[in-house]
Amino acid sequence: MFMRNAKALCPHLVIVPYDFEAYEEVADQFYNILHKHSKKVQAVSCDEAFLDVTASEEQDPETLACMIRKEIFDGTGCTASAGIAGNLLMARLATRSAKPDGQCYIPNEKVDDYLLQLPIKALPGIGHVLEQKLNKRHVQTCEQLRAISKDSLQKDFGTKTGEMLWNYCRGVDNRAVGIIKENKSIGAEVNWGVRFKDLSDVHRFLLSLCKEVSLRLQGCEVQGRTFTLKIKKRRKDAGEPVKYMGCGECENLSHSTTVPVPTDSVDVLQRITMQLFSFFHIDVRDIRGVGLQVSRLESSDCLKQEYERNTMKSWLASVTTNSQNLLEGERGGSSCSKSNGNTSKITWDTRSREASLDTHSALPALNDLDVSVLENLPSDLLSEMNEMYDGKLVDFLSENKGRMKDPVHSAPQDGVEGSKINAEEAGPCFEIQTDSIDKNDEVCYRNFKALFSDSARSMGHPSVDVFAPADCGLMPSSLSQVDVSVLQQLPKELREDIVDLLPAHRSTNYQSDAKKDSMEQLAVGATLDQSGVLESDSCDELWNGRPPLWIDKFKGSNCLMLKVLAEMYFMSGSTSKLSSILQCSVSNSELQAVAADDDTVNCLCKLVMQYIQLKLDTDLEEMYLCFRLLRRFSKKSEVFRQLYDVGYPYLQTCIRGSYGGSLNLSPLEELLIPFLPDGSSHPPFGVDKRLIFFSTGLCLVPDMLLFIQGWTKRSFCGPTPEDITERTQVFIEPDSMETQYLVGIQHL
Amino acid sequence: MSVELAKAANAKKPSHSPQAETARILVELLEVAVTSILYLKGLYPSGAYERRRYLNLLVHRAIHPELRSYIYSSVNELFAFIEKGLVERIAVIFFGCDGVPVEKFVFKLHVSQSNGSEVEVDQLESSLRSLLVKLSVSDMLTKVLPSDCKWEIVAYFNALPDTDGIKETQFWKPTETKQWRQPSLITPIKSMSSESVALQLYVEHQTETEI
């Protein structure tokens, strides 16, 4: 009844005004009491809420309800009613029976009794329209509704509504208490008191409306992309509305538009709203209601919101910050160990610079020394070295004097060799001189000169000029190919001379791949001669064939590690990718325990070097993966440490030659993130600490990216899409501190 | 008469040669990939792109006509050279106001010139798709760009093309971007190879000079 009618009927009517402050106070108290009794409170309105009391101390729900109601009454002076049941639906229905000031408990066994005669319009979610539709099918009570099959309901009313109807009439409700629903749209609408005189009225109104909506958007911290302006237009034949200043009978019109960039700004909203309003061709005096709705909402702090990014990026960001902190610590630690560690073999690694300062560097084995360098050493140095080797050095030298081990002569002219040789020759002198750096430089300089003069002589050039012309094949053909670490340690004048002599980049002179490969193969073979005893049959094509030739060789060898590695080839799915084999080997404890011996290391070096040559021009990614894995390995296994020490500089030199830069294997860990198709992240498969098995169903589809992450600071590189087969097994290296692993697959 | 005609027809390489097919696919991919790189780096606001579907993936395309035509024409004018295997690398270079590059995204190509069998389009497409996906999540590998940076597309040839018959060369001019003094640091993003083409995508940065 409208107020004016009431007043007409009852002239002395007392009208109680609103008291919003009091309502707020009561509501606060009400919710405080509720929160005391349960952790899961779902608010429905300022005076109505659902509580999940499954975990309550008080076992009897009726007693509990009684207690709460009493507290409410004592605290606020208002009575309250409670409905108690096994789910949200029944509890709500129970409350209706309980009102006023009462409570009603519907235990599970009484549900059917309660429902059977209940009219369907009593069910929440069934409004006027649904009721009419059901009435047409002669359904008035829940019992009658139960007679209709679920399929039939879903076909007529849609999947969700059909299911709801089927469930509700049986008292089934699976909603959990406390689920917060995200707003799908935000807006503001005014339908009462709307009377415009002219266009400026409307504009002012729309402006205020935009301000309100913008505030609401900002309040929920969202931005939207679709804007809908709704207008209620008075129907032509409608008289004055029954309700004073109401909207009366109207037709609803709306126009909407979508923008690409989500926004919550008042200005943008205003511009859009004005534009939308211009689409209505309507007399302003006929407007009885206006509303603005914003949908396609996106949270305002992550602006880039594509589906993949939303899930991937926030994971990447959050774990990066964690790992960065851990990384700082690791980096600090490892740099200390670098300077203390020494190399017992000759290496080209820059670490040897620090090793030279360490007075306790172990002597390389006699066989490891480069004879040609020794021959060229000044006599005082040679005698000093000899003393270190207890006199054996001279004998060794005389034995090997005849043998030309100088790689200069065995390799044809190619600028790339030049830089390798420089590094090689420079190597031993760092080992010997442990007192001062100056002496180092001097020795190095003399060695350098000696090397050139020696070969210059042998080449038939009369001059003993240090810088033999570039066509003697010793000098690298450009600065980009010079080993920078060596260059830096040369004395100043020498350095400057080299820099002046060499161009920055070699001229574009692309030899065919095959030729380049074979030359560098020879260099590989030659340099390896220096570092130790090779297998008797030195084969250059270890990676040819399926399975590659090295598998058989390794299987037949005496060394455990080589045998195991060959096995790993088969375990990793018989792909000829070294990275897969290494991945499988990561957690193999047999491999970790193997002690380092020269033979093994040499075999592995050869294998890796040939692999580098094979993949250099076409597969940087594979190189990257292999060396990341090798590096990780090297922290656990002496064999791999030596392998890495030899392989890493070789890799960088090769890459510098082909690409003009060095491969960045720096600490930034690649993080691979887990997802399941539904966006959750939960290991779906059997996961023991090291092995993750994939059920066939999930792996058959090739266009999936596999991501695996352990919560460790070390990264793990997953197989590429092409590699996933139904028997893909992926090993994660366990970290003693971490036990959690997340695994997932994302469909592309 | 007919023999001569047949000869003439054979003299020209048919436009559905494997190289042409590969080059077509590559050019299309490059257009998408370059736009993806721009999107990744956030050089232009995200509203400057529209979402499109390519190889069953969500990708972006520039809306602004000038931007779109720059990217489109740059890669399409390379078509003839890519087909002949003359292009070695194509780089998207971001450089600051001093002309020194901050970051380079390099596509290293090798189109096989041998007259082999048909191009395996499906396999090629799936490799390219994985490249694009990897690219889209690679922003961790890259640096933050300074606010006033510029960018350009640079192509590196391994032999200068002979100009007769190819009119596209006029659209390309020598780059003025400066070189880095030290060798760069390379971080690979994706490498793929097949019978007809080998394509690698990697990022280059300046080596941080210590001391």
Image (tube, rainbow, N blue to C red):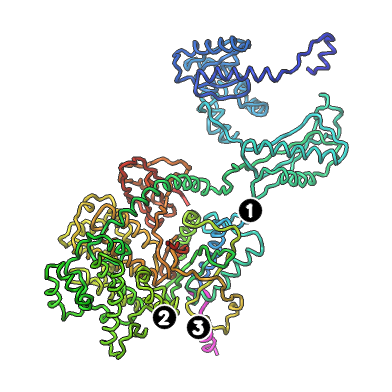
> Disc 1 designates what residue?
B47
- Please provide the residue range marked out in magenta: B1-17
C-alpha span from label 3 to label 1: 49 Å
Disc 2 crowd rating (10 Å Cα; few below 14, some 14-19, many 20+) is: some
- Mark on residue B10? 3
Say which element carries label 3.
helix
Q: Are marks 1 and 2 in contact (CB under 8 Å)?
A: no
Say which element carries label 2.
helix
C-alpha span from label 2 to label 3: 50 Å
In the displayed structure, does residue A168 sit left or right of residue A747? right
Q: Are marks 2 and 3 on the same chain?
A: no
Give x and y (percent) for residue A634: 28, 56
In the displayed structure, does residue A98 sit left or right of residue A192? left
Disc 1 crowd rating (10 Å Cα; few below 14, some 14-19, many 20+) is: some
- At 31% across and 57% down in the image, what residue appears? A339
- At 44% across and 76% down in the image, what residue appears? A505
| Residue A57 vertical placement versus B40 (above, below) | above
- Mark 2 belongs to which amino acid? Leu
- At 32% across and 50% down in the image, what residue appears? A729
Quarter assignment of residue A434: bottom left
Q: Are marks 3 and 1 in contact (CB under 8 Å)?
A: no
> Disc 2 designates what residue?
A501
In front: mark 1 or mark 2?
A: 2
| Residue B164 vertical placement versus A135 (above, below) | below
In front: mark 2 or mark 3?
A: 2
Earlier residue among tags 3 and 1: 3
C-alpha span from label 1 to label 2: 52 Å
The answer to whether residue A636 is seen in the rendering is: yes
| Quarter containing the N terminus of chain A | top right
In the displayed structure, does residue A462 sit left or right of residue B154? left
